[in-house]
Amino acid sequence: MHLVPVDSHKTGKRESAQDGHHHNGTPEQNPHISDAEGRAMARAAVNLFTRWDLTDAQACTLLGGISVATYTRWKRGDIGRLGVDRKTRLSNLMGIHKALRLLFTDNDRVYGWVHRDNDVYGGRTALDIMLGGQLTDLMRVRRYLDAVRG
């Protein structure tokens, strides 16, 4: 069975890459993520990026363009303040990871999927899509995985 990603143009909703909200004012998800939840997701993302074998530069792109110095502090556990965009990015990354854990039982597939060419993305990898750097790029991959999961 071939599933296509659920794109916003098909649902009639438009997202803002700045705030993760639809233009009708409803949040894409998780309208309020506490600072403690955000820091926990940031720590989990650092571990996930290690399992995905990302460079620091790639990690910084997925996190919305933070500096390598900031990401280095994150790796030491010094997360600092997280804005709404960063929390929304982290939430989407955790959703992607959760979906992969539910879809696959083999860790090589769970952590390797982002590096595999995918027909849904025109032969590109999910990582290629996410490295577009926009919040909507993360959302696109998450929505695809959520659609596959059903």
Image: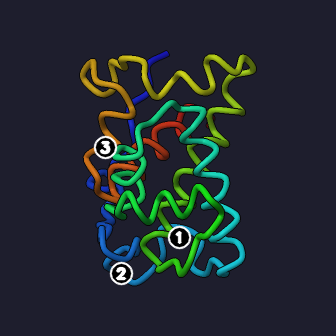
Task: Choose between 116 and 27: the one closer to the eye.
Answer: 116
Label 2 residue SS: loop
Horizontal side, residue 87 vs residue 14: left or right: right
Residue drawn at the location 36% of the way across and 43% of the way down: 58
Is the C-beta separation of discs 2 and 3 under 8 Å? no
Residue drawn at the location 47% of the way across and 59% of the way down: 71
Label 1 residue SS: helix
Horizontal side, residue 50 vs residue 61: left or right: right
Residue type (three-letter) at the residue carrying disc 2? Asn
From this view, report whether residue 61 is shown above or below residue 89.
Answer: above
Residue type (three-letter) at the residue carrying disc 1? Lys
Residue type (three-letter) at the residue carrying disc 3? Leu
From this view, report whether residue 143 is shown above or below residue 102.
Answer: below
Q: Which mark is residue 131?
A: 3
Q: Quadrant of residue 17?
A: bottom left
Q: Quadrant of residue 98?
A: top right
Q: CA distance from mark 1 to mark 2?
A: 20 Å
Q: Which mark is residue 24?
A: 2
Is the C-beta separation of discs 1 and 3 under 8 Å? no
Q: What residue is pinned by disc 1?
A: 87
